[in-house]
Amino acid sequence: MTATAHSPVRWNDTTVQALNRRFRDAPPEDVLAWAAAEFGDGAALTCSFGGSAGMVLLDMIARQRLPIAVIFLDTDLLFPETYALVAEVERRYGLPIIRQRPALSLEDQARLHGPALYNRDPDRCCAIRKVAPLAEALRPYQAWISGIRREQTAQRAATEPVAWNAKYGLLKLSPLAAWSARQVWAYIGAHDVPYNPLLDQGYPSLGCAPCTCPASADNPRGGRWNGFARTECGIHT
Ligand code: SF4
């Protein structure tokens, strides 16, 4: 891995704003190419293999043969279709997918916190099975690339292409911040990108199986954590 010194001293308001002026209306491929040139293999994409946007970024990375790593957070509770898509992507693109799992097995979690923690305390469950594993996975990297888009939720509405992420201590890149769902699906159709088949079966947003229900396309994250007032697992907040 390229050991370049990157720090909040370098990525301050002035430098980040300059990057956002440069990339606000730029094609996502330009952001990815810049990340590869700037960080080498010190940049990583997180891909849930549930949503469609992550698949677009993965395809762009593969198509440009960029040295960007692909991280898959495996909570042990994903849909079978999600695991099947990971295997299909490995076969099709020949990309090594870094599979990051929680420190606690489901059995250990049940022993320490009781069974089906997601039904009682999803904040704690996500902290154990998503947030902490992501921190571990991102530790070697200087830049984190994510597929979040502004139109997904009110919490994501102010997403810029580039931001300093103090939580994980790295630069966060959101190359699709300004893209609409229509643009995402147009790219997928044009490039024959594989995607999770559940997205065609009434699930506009996919996470762990116990916390994902079908939802309307108008409120794509409305089927996540049904019964709880949350639309984010904590990795983007
Ligand atoms: S989405 Fe649900 S099952 Fe998955 S980590 Fe969060 S609370 Fe647990």
Image (cartoon, helix red, strand yellow):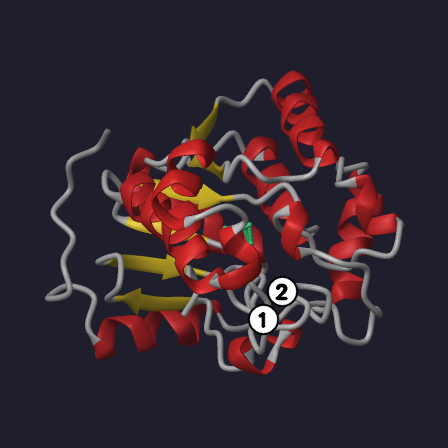
Mark 2 close to ligand 1, CB under 8 Å: yes
User: Which of the two discs, 2 and 1, labels the residue nearer the N terminus?
Assistant: 2
Residue 201 appears at what percent x and percent y? Answer: 89, 50
Give left or right: position of 220 versus 147.
Answer: right
Q: Residue at x 61, y 71 (%)?
A: 178
Name the secondary structure under disc 1.
loop
- Which quarter of the rendered picture does the N terminus lie within? top left
Q: Is residue 155 above or below residue 119?
A: below
Q: Is residue 83 above or below residue 25?
A: above
Q: Nearer the viewer, mark 2 or mark 1?
A: 2
- Which quarter of the rendered picture does the C terminus lie within? bottom left
Residue 26 appears at what percent x and percent y? Answer: 55, 65
How crowded is the residue under tag 2: few (<14 C-alpha within 10 Å), some, or many (20+)? Answer: many
Q: Disc 1 marks which amino acid?
A: Thr
Residue 43 appears at what percent x and percent y? Answer: 35, 43
- The answer for how far apart the CA atoms under marks 2 and 1 are is 7 Å
Query: Which is more toward the observer, 19 or 138?
Result: 138
The tag on residue 231 is 1
Q: Which residue is mark 2?
A: 225
Q: Is residue 171 above or below residue 113?
A: below
Name the secondary structure under disc 2.
loop
Q: Residue at x 21, y 58 (%)?
A: 169
Task: Return the residue found at the far right.
Answer: 201
Residue 150 appears at what percent x and percent y? Answer: 59, 74
Check if mark 2's residue and mark 1's residue have beta carbons within 8 Å.
yes
How crowded is the residue under tag 1: few (<14 C-alpha within 10 Å), some, or many (20+)? Answer: some
Query: Which is more toward the observer, 27 or 97?
Result: 97
Query: Which is more toward the observer, 138 or 22?
Result: 138
Q: Disc 2 marks which amino acid?
A: Trp
Give left or right: position of 113 versus 180.
Answer: left
